[in-house]
Image (spheres, rainbow, N blue to C red):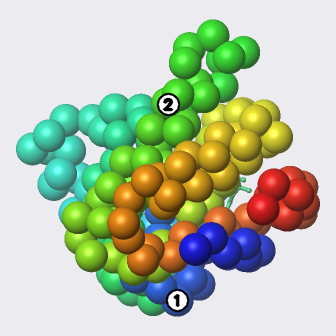
Amino acid sequence: MIHLLQGDITLFEGDAIVNAANSSLRGGGGVDGAIHKAAGPALLQECQEWVRHNGDLPTGKAMITKGGNLKARWVIHTVGPVWSSGTQDEDFLLSQCYINCLHLCVERNIRTVAFPNISTGVYGFPKTDAAEVAVASVRNFLSSSHTDLEVSFMCFDEENYTLYQKLL
Ligand code: ADP
């Protein structure tokens, strides 16, 4: 099941939210900054600990931490591709972000998860293409795996919200 929501992902009342992180998992601006601010310092600590053991999180991969002060119990961190005119496998890597997050949800028995519009802020991915990749990836995953996972797309800006409305 897929839902479309508009607003601040830090307020999502479900099992997990996805963070559009950077490879060093050090927090930053945009949705990443908002999530770290709302979750509190325990989130950064857990991320730094993970990087000490595993190194940077590669583009397209995902890892999971506790949600700290968030309403969501878990935060799934994934690193979206930086848009580079479509020459660096950006569509594939963006799709991998969604799929790897969804695999983690199934592994952890997460029933409800919200995604932000990964890579469509500072990372510059064209919003139309990103929305198409996001919706197709989630639809394919849900239709090919036996899960009752509920996925929400949490659009922050009007442009993304309208694009997703059309696609869904
Ligand atoms: P990226 O580096 O992956 O592009 P950004 O954080 O710059 O990440 O932007 C990703 C998307 O997250 C953008 O569409 C932006 O509008 C959206 N966004 C920013 N803040 C929030 C928030 N609090 N909740 C949900 N989405 C947000």
Relative horizontal placement of residue 138, taking residue 121 as reference (left or right): left
Relative horizontal placement of residue 158, taking residue 124 as reference (left or right): right
At a point 66% along the width and 52% down the height, the residue shown is 135
Q: Is mark 2 within 8 Å of ligand 1?
A: no
| Figure quadrant of residue 122 | top right
| Figure quadrant of residue 116 | bottom right
Amino acid bearing label 2: Leu
Q: How many marks?
A: 2
| Figure quadrant of residue 89 | top right
Which residue is under mark 2?
93
Q: Which element type, helix, strand or loop, lies under badge 1?
A: loop
Residue 28: x and y, percent? 51, 51
Which residue is under mark 1?
13
At a point 44% along the width and 74% down the height, the residue shown is 149
Amino acid bearing label 1: Glu
The answer to whether residue 101 is visible is yes
Quarter of the image for the N terminus: give it. bottom right
Residue 42 higher or lower than 21, as above or below: below
Residue 158: x and y, percent? 89, 63
- Tag 2 or tag 1, which sits nearer the N-term? 1
Residue 39: x and y, percent? 42, 77
Gap in angstroms between the C-alphas marked 1 and 2? 28 Å
Q: Which element type, helix, strand or loop, lies under badge 2?
A: helix
Taking the view exactly as shown, the residue that stands out farthest to the top is 87
Q: Residues within 10 Å of mark 1 (few under 14, many from 20)?
A: some
